[in-house]
Image (tube, grey):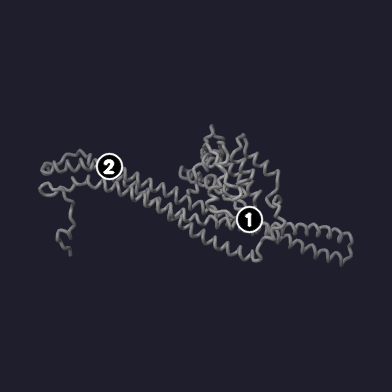
Amino acid sequence: MDPLPSAAVAAAAEAEADEEADPPATGPQTSQVTEQRDLDPGRMQMPQGNPLLLSYTLQELLARDTVQRFKSSVYRRYNDFVVFHEVLLHKFPYRMVPALPPKRVLGADREFIEGRRRALKRFINLVARHPPFSDDVLLKIFLSFSGSDVQHKLKEAAQCVGDEFTNCKLAARAKDFLPADIQTQFAMSRELIRNVYNSFYKLRDRAERIATRAIDNAADLLIFGKELSALGSDTTPLPSWAALHLSTWGSLKQALKGLSVEFALLADKAAQQGKKEENDVVEKLNLFLDLLQSYKDLCERHEKGVLHKHQRALHKYGLMKRQMMSAAHGREPESVEQLESRIVEQENVIQTMELRNYFSLYCLHQETQLVHVYLPLTSHILGAFVNSQIQGHKEMSKVWNDLKPKLSCLFAGPHSVLTPPRSPQEDGVCSH
């Protein structure tokens, strides 16, 4: 199954129509999105026992494509994606929110624009298949709102409700569902996914080089054929002393002139193979790398965000307790009463931060499971790579075989018998 269905880019593909343009485009470029029948909801629910556990398979995630649920055509600029990304992070701070590609670089060219378009396509695919995101109103607005200001609509929707912690009924009980060794499991999973990321990063780089070589090979074959054609079309007259070979050279030129067609066909086949490897192999590797990078970013947010705030709150609480002890020793009733009130407030803050910390770990545990659900994507990538090689070499081989008989006139032997040139070893020549 192809994890990047073409219909899943309804919004992402249009974001690049303006290329670097911040001003609105003159006319929306849209892709029609067809409605897809939802999967059986019963199969997609989490187990009744422990809500921490996910029951999705890779096939279900790839089929869980919310983009195709909305029968609408929308146009989105890059800045719309930026706002959508911001509100997602605000509402789901403890989930994997894929990063956006850079807006522009100095002297951006068509290659940069195409790379950014592909990255936005991967972004919208990952978001649309992420369980908490796929049913959220923010995604629905982004993919179906046809008003003039989708950014304002997204911000308005995000302001109406708090983040996932404040809206999740299980947030206060997240600790009850976590394993006792959650910190150890988190450290091990983080190390594993870091190693997987490094390996897939290297695989992606090699796959890019393989695809690039195929495209370069296509350019070389095309030039090779053109040079043969140019040689065959040369009209420079032969000198008088070479007139004896005039008919032979004329036959050779005629044969060379026609070979450009076959070499152009070879170039086309090589280019097709390179593009197929880019789309079916490199893009799938990039999709998985984007997911793994979002997990790494989430781990950093957990440590630098809620965990750091929790530690700061505890430190502040300790300072207040020491101040209260000093005030009590000095017998300052008003100061003691004020400190007691502040300490109670700080205890409430600490309690909330502790609950957020456990909820963050709860979400991290689920996101780790989600990454592992995506791991079998490796088989899709390898299958696509093998198939592209088999199909590409098969088609190239057919053209080469069709080309071979057309070379026979180039090998005119004695008594007009057409024979290919022999090697020195075949002729009994021994080189020293």
Depth check, front residue: 170 or 226: 170
Sequence-earlier tag: 2 or 1: 1
- Picture quarter containing residue 329? bottom right
122 up-or-down from 367: above or below:
above
The three-letter code of the residue at mark 2 reads: Ser
The image's mark for residue 204 is: none
At 70% from the left and 45% from the top, the residue drawn is: 161
Residue 357 visible at all: no
Residue that protrudes farthest toward the bottom in the picture: 329
Residue position for label 1: 47
Expressed as whole percent of the image width and height from the top left, the position of residue 80 reads 59, 41
Q: Position of residue 16 (x, y in %)?
A: 51, 40
Q: Is residue 330 left or right of residue 178?
A: right
The residue under the point 63% across, 47% down is 88
Question: Is the C-beta separation of discs 2 and 1 under 8 Å?
Answer: no
Q: Which residue is mark 2?
A: 260
Nearer to us: label 2 or label 1: 1
Q: Is residue 89 left or right of residue 386?
A: right
- For the point 60% across and 41% down, the residue is 142
Q: Secondary structure at mark 1?
A: loop
Asked whether the viewer can see residue 333, the reply is: yes
